[in-house]
Amino acid sequence: MVNRIMPVGPPSAYQTYQITSPVATHYRDATCREVDCERYVKGWNSALDTSRPEHAAAATWIRMKSGRAFTVTEAGPIVTFTFPAGQECFEKHKAPVGRPEFYLVRGGDWRGNPRNIPTVRHNADTWVDDFANHQDRLKTEHERG
């Protein structure tokens, strides 16, 4: 439930300035840097039990083909790779496809648009200019009394 203060005037006396962003429905592959991956920022460790064939294969791949910088410590069959910060981890990251914001001016307020004023869609610069002009008109009217 939304808690709102009841406006002084009717909906027809208002104009709503809104910036909204479309819902992301499409994703693309992304880098660790783009998604602020914690491993990229802080580094990470990977401990592998090389007595297990799949872990032994992963350890060989890391050493020979991963292309990552690392240090290795070994304790029996446990091999721990320490990867410093600033390089891509092994996880596949996804980021939403960037979709531009909508800069809108609507008639009325949250209660409705009784005069059926069409919604105007601006670019960022014209929206800011329109908003500033509107604020100036309100200030001028207020000063007149």
Image: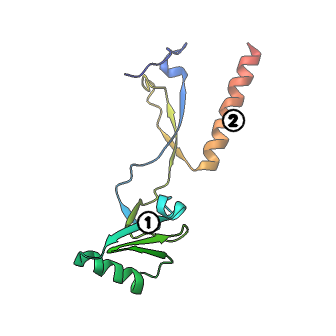
Q: Quadrant of the N terminus?
A: top left
Between 136 and 31, the one nearer to me in the picture:
31
Query: Residue 45's mark?
Result: 1
Residue 38 shows in the view: yes
| Residue at 57 percent of width and 50 percent of height | 123
Instruction: Say which element carries label 2.
Output: helix
Foreground: disc 1 or disc 2: 1
Q: Amino acid at mark 2?
A: Asn
Q: Amino acid at mark 1?
A: Asn
Question: x, y percentage for residue 92?
Answer: 37, 67
Q: CA distance from mark 1 to mark 2?
A: 56 Å
| Residue at 76 percent of width and 17 percent of height | 143
Identify the image quadrant of residue 95.
Answer: bottom left
The crowd level at tag 2 (other Cα within 10 Å; few <14, some 14-19, many 20+) is few
Q: Quadrant of the C terminus?
A: top right
> Image height check: is 129 above or below 31?
above
Q: Earlier in the sequence, mark 1 or mark 2?
A: 1
Question: x, y percentage for residue 125?
Answer: 64, 49
Question: x, y percentage for residue 21?
Answer: 46, 47
Instruction: Say which element carries label 1.
Output: strand
| Residue at 50 percent of width and 62 percent of height | 34
> Image height check: is 12 above or below 119?
above
Q: Is residue 99 left or right of residue 142?
A: left
| Residue at 47 percent of width and 38 percent of height | 119
Q: Is residue 140 left or right of residue 119?
A: right
The crowd level at tag 1 (other Cα within 10 Å; few <14, some 14-19, many 20+) is some
Q: What residue sits right under mark 2 in the picture?
A: 133
Question: x, y percentage for residue 106?
Answer: 50, 34
Q: Answer yes or no: do the residues labelled 1 and 2 have beta carbons within 8 Å?
A: no
Between 75 and 64, the one nearer to me in the picture:
75
Identify the image quadrant of residue 66.
Answer: bottom left
